[in-house]
Amino acid sequence: MEIPEFPILGTEPLSVEFANTMYGSGAAQTDYLQTPELIALWFAEMVGSDAGAPLPPPVDQQVRALRDAVREILYAVAGGRMPQPGAVEIVNEFSGRAPSFPVLTWSAGEPPTTHRLFATTGVDGILARIATECVELIAGSDTVTVRPCPAPDCTMLFVKNHSRRRWCHPSCGHRDRQARYYRRHHPTEATR
Ligand SMILES: [Zn+2]
């Protein structure tokens, strides 16, 4: 199977990259987790998982259900609205699938740091990690601003990690400036 070019920014928290696997809108929408094979490839690329083998149904449906819920919640927080009913319950159900605990790392000459370790490997651990990170991203002690990219036809979410960042990727900024330039110079065509 040909490996598709996934919409991965490589800079975002895992839950945001996960939400971005549904790309575009309307008839042009593409689900990059449409098949068990695609899910396995995405997992391998994003979490270097041992879940490299295609997931049996209905696990692949559960992956997409969590993705849709995470995406709905991130878009809701970006839009300053409540998420659709059920999305919060789905994320909570998955975050409860694997226990996790904080791990302390302390090396000489460095400040102590912590990260969260999930007790379950495999797909349940990955989904629990994505769900937990989504919860902590939007409601944890260190909440962030999530935004959809404003470039034409781009639906990628990103964490606005500094005040000047406007687009998901510099290439979208370039495209957006080109589109606005075009609208200014071809006002009638652009409104068709
Ligand atoms: Zn973009």
Image (spheres, rainbow, N blue to C red):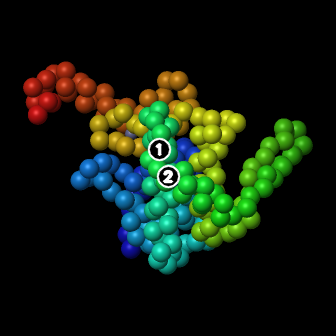
| Residue under the point 23% across and 53% down | 27
Is residue 164 left or right of 143 when viewed as pictured? left
Q: Regarding mark 1 in the picture, which secondary structure is present there? A: loop
In the picture, the quarter occupied by the C terminus is: top left
Q: Is residue 101 above or below residue 111?
A: below
Classify the position of the N terminus by image quarter. Answer: bottom left
The verdict on label 2 being within 8 Å of ligand 1 is no
- Residue furthest toward the top? 184
The residue at which mark 2 appears reads as: 87
User: Can residue 147 be seen by looking at this rendering?
Assistant: no
Indicate the amino acid at tag 2. Ala
The local secondary structure at tag 2 comes to helix
Find residue 33 and report its horizontal and vertical position in percent.
42, 63
Q: Are marks 1 and 2 in contact (CB under 8 Å)?
A: yes
At label 2, counting other C-alpha atoms closer than 10 Å, the crowd grade (few under 14, some 14-19, many 20 or more) is some
Q: In what quadrant does ligand 1 lie?
A: top left
Amino acid type, mark 1: Pro
Where residue 72 sits in the image (x, y, percent)?
Answer: 45, 47
Q: Quadrant of residue 89?
A: bottom right
Q: Is residue 182 above or below residue 114?
A: above
Residue 175, how many percent across, how many down?
31, 34
Residue marked by disc 1: 83
Residue 4 can be seen, yes or no: yes
Q: Is residue 168 above or below residue 71?
A: above
Taking depth in this image into account, of 67 and 165 the one nearest to the observer is 67
Q: Residues within 10 Å of mark 1 (few under 14, many from 20)?
A: some
Count of numbered badges drawn on the protein: 2
Q: Say which residue appears at 32% left-offset and 48% top-offset.
A: 24
Q: Residue at (84%, 38%) from the top-left corner? A: 111
| Residue at the spot 44% in from the left edge and 47% down from the top edge | 84
Q: Nearer the viewer, residue 87 or 136?
A: 87
Horizontal arrangement in the rendering, residue 19 relative to residue 184 (left or right): right
